[in-house]
Image (spheres, rainbow, N blue to C red):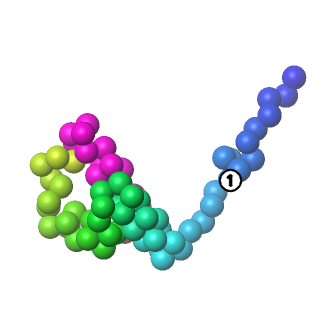
Amino acid sequence: MVAETDTLANQIIWTTRQEELQEIDRLARSRLDLTGEEFLRDLDAGRWDDVIDDPGYEDVLYLALLADVVRS
């Protein structure tokens, strides 16, 4: 028996920097009630440094990791 694979899950989906920034904006608005621009500015200013590893702030960590991808 051959196992079925989810073809979409096994594909690379390329995104533009603009699409990635739009996704950060969407997620920041829904999870933190901030715009993506506000989140990135606060991240750069160190606002999240003290809580980024706190399990209660998992949304901040998720967005920070996504920001690293966008900026690379």
Amino acid type, label 1 = Gln
71 in magenta: no
Tell me if residue 22 comes above or below residue 56 in the rendering.
below
The residue shown at (75%, 47%) is: 7
**Which class describes the residues within 10 Å of circle 1: few (<14), some (14-19), or many (20+)?**
few
To which quarter of the image does residue 68 belong? bottom left
Q: Secondary structure at mark 1?
A: loop
Q: Is residue 8 above or below residue 69?
A: above
The residue indicated by pointer 1 is 11
- Is 53 situated left or right of 37 in this image? left
Residues 54 and 28: in front is 28
Determine if residue 68 is in view: no
Q: Main secondary structure of the magenta part?
A: helix
What span is colored magenta in the figure?
Answer: 53-66
Residue at (43%, 71%) from the top-left corner? 21
Point out the image quarter for the C terminus. bottom left
Q: Residue 20 location in percent, x, y?
A: 47, 68
Q: Quadrant of residue 24?
A: bottom left
Give how far across and how far down residue 51 sits, in percent.
Answer: 17, 46
Q: Residue 47 appears in which quarter of the rendering? A: bottom left
The answer to whether residue 50 of the structure is visible from this angle is: yes
Say which quadrant the N terminus sits in.
Answer: top right
Q: Residue 4: percent from the left, percent from the top?
A: 80, 34
Tell me the residue at 30%/57% (across/down): 32
Residue 42 position within the rendered picture, expressed as x and y whole percent measured from the top left: 19, 66
Residue drawn at the location 85% of the way across and 28% of the way down: 2
In the image shown, does 71 or 60 lie closer to the viewer?
A: 60
